[in-house]
Amino acid sequence: MLAFGYRKFGGPAVFEAMAQPGLKPTGNQILIETLAVNLNDEDRNERLGTNTQLALPLIPGHDVVGQIIEIGPAVTGFEVGTVIAAHTQHTYAEQVLLDSDLAVTVPTDLTPAQAVSLVTPGIIAYKTVRYFADVQRDQTVIIRGAENSIGMLAVQLAQRLGAQVIAIAPNRFSDRLTALGVHQVVAPDRQNPNHVLADQGDVVIDLTRQGEHGKDNLAVAKFDATIASFAPSLPATSKSIRFQSIHPTNVISDQATLQMLFKLLRTGQLTVAIAQQLPFTLNGFIQGHTLLDAPHDGQLVVAK
């Protein structure tokens, strides 16, 4: 069985093909033949060595869609031949072994690339909108970082709940966000959002990579607003703010989240943006991570 990983941290060129022993499911495990994987910032950060707990050599990857080729004796609800999606580990491989409790059946009318592109970005966006930000009908929701994959999904999910969504994103994304139906797009490269949107947000969602816009988020939030961000905390403020730091949570399960996202996608209530689909080869993973290191619009998917 072939996998793609690295023996040292660094740039995309650290990737190499690695022969791995055959995998055998036991207990509640299932074995899948990989069809597609999604490349995320988490994968990039691991490759750069930001997680000092990782042991080398490493087969990275977290988002996978694959077809079940073998099931453990305790598995129920899945059959050989079923295509599933999961958020798990070591997915840059021809075969992936995972706990069946992590798996969600992929509807037959979705492609593996479509389904896998929703895994991490969709889970984060859904839990942010529904749990951390707790978006309600008729609220004014300001989404910073609306141009990235998580942001585009959060925009659509907040609108489905009946919120009036204002997007903060570079001007080149204005047409795309307007097509999604946002109430307003404020481009920091054209206007100062703090002035244009001062004290307007019932909810402010910051989906930029580090969530470093704490003071700016406070400026556009109403008194008694909710702010959800990847940042661990907010700067001091006289406003009465409900702050939520976005982090992994099982309050809403990943499986329930993916089932809902797949339903929305297949019924046309949600769209995904795939920037590029790359071949499931060593060069495909190297090229994918090269693109991951640079600004890109949409998800990067490696697929067979």
Image (spheres, rainbow, N blue to C red):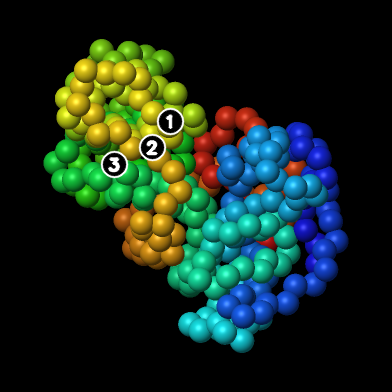
Residue located beneath label 2 in the image: 245
Q: Amino acid at mark 2?
A: Ser
Q: Residue sitting at 58 percent across and 70 percent down?
A: 99
Mark 3 or 2: the one toward you: 2
Residue at far right of view: 19
Against 100, residue 283 (above or below) is above
What is the CA distance from the residue labelled 3 to the residue labelled 2?
A: 10 Å
User: Residue at the spot x=39%, y=28% of the render?
Assistant: 233
Relative to the observer, which residue lies in front, 134 or 126?
A: 134
Give the amino acid at mark 3: Ala
Determine whether 212 is above or below 288 in the image. above
Q: Which mark is residue 158?
A: none
Instruction: Check the image and report above or below for 188 versus 295.
Output: above
Mark 1 or mark 2: whose residue is earlier in sequence: 1
Q: Which residue is mark 1?
A: 231
Q: CA distance from mark 1 to mark 2?
A: 6 Å
Q: Which mark is residue 133?
A: 3
Q: Label 1: state its secondary structure.
A: loop
Q: Residue at x 63, y 30 (%)?
A: 294
